[in-house]
Amino acid sequence: MKQAFDELEVGQAIEGPRFAVTRVTIREFCEASLDYNPLHLDDEFMQGRFGKTEFGGVIMHGMTNFGLITRMLTDWLYPRGGVHRRLETRWLNPVRPGDSIQPRGVVTAKQATAKGRWVTLHIEVCNQRGEQVARGEAMAEFPMA
Amino acid sequence: MEEEFETDFWKDAERRKMWDDIVPGEFRKTIPYVLTLEAIQRYCRAVGEDHPLYFDESYARTTRYNGLIAPPSIHILLMFACTPVDDWMRSPGTINAGQSWSYNVPARPSDTISLQARALDKFIKKARLFVVHDNVFFNQHGQVICSGRGWTIRPM
């Protein structure tokens, strides 16, 4: 684990698989998360206005981004002995059926503390047009033993 | 429990607190939830998680986790599993603006999960009604699984 931490470099990039969003994947996420908000299911409801925002149709759960980012991080960390410790994200743009999205991360800092070794990563999720739909920051620990 | 889950979020809409009713600092009602392997794996499949730590018991026993675990983001499911039908997180039109979570020990199949949750803050910004909520999930041993904070835009 020490070796894996030592070998990490600021600027190192990681990426997760691209995810194709459909009404079926959104429905599956409803069933898996128990989040049945009509934002994700009801096109008629989504013709309305939400304050200043008009979506015009159903949108993907923002937390799907969160799940895809987590998958990218843990798939990268597990074989290196790292532990996913923190993820903070903001949703910037809605994701709709027909979009495809992909998470990416870049190591921005390494920090040794009294009892741990930590890595900070900048995180983003972009759609097929290269637009950011989510952005945030993650932290991982590489335990001493 | 999952068979009893109400999937029509309109049904109890009138019973849920609006932005005006939400008191920062006030705890939300929560309910314990037994996390099944089936629920973990259903969640995994929905986000393409296929790591053997979530599917292969014999492999998982050889790792530092010494058995199957749930992915850290399982709190996405737990948020709705551990709250009742009149919880304001279910209000149709609730928009998730962002979240921040810290992870301690993993959740495991057969864990009984409990939640401490409350509204922490509310404010108006650019004509939108925001509520900040904070949440801590525990296992049956009293260990913190994860803690997090979320920002939602409330329906008018």
Image (cartoon, rainbow, N blue to C red):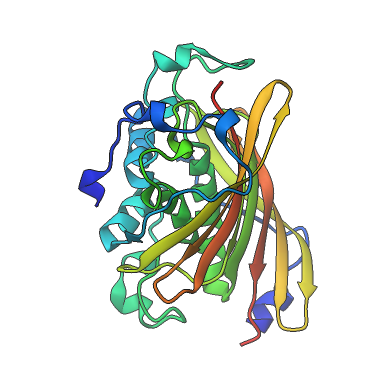
Horizontal arrangement in the rendering, residue B28 relative to residue B69 (left or right): right
Residue drawn at point x = 41 percent, y = 55 percent: B49
The answer to which image quadrant residue A145 occupies is: bottom right
Residue drawn at point x = 45 percent, y = 31 percent: B91
Horizontal and vertical percent for residue B70?
A: 40, 64
> Viewer-proximal residue, A59 or A39?
A39
Residue drawn at point x = 54 percent, y = 24 percent: B155
> Viewer-proximal residue, A62 or A107?
A62
Horizontal and vertical percent for residue B136?
A: 53, 60
Horizontal arrangement in the rendering, residue B34 relative to residue A100 (left or right): left
Horizontal arrangement in the rendering, residue A6 relative to residue A53 (left or right): right
**Vertical arrangement, residue B92 with respect to residue B43, above or below:** above
Horizontal and vertical percent for residue B122?
A: 67, 37
Horizontal and vertical percent for residue A142?
A: 64, 76
> Viewer-proximal residue, B103 or B50?
B103
> Viewer-proximal residue, B100 or B66?
B100
Q: Can residue A131 be seen in the rendering of this structure?
A: no
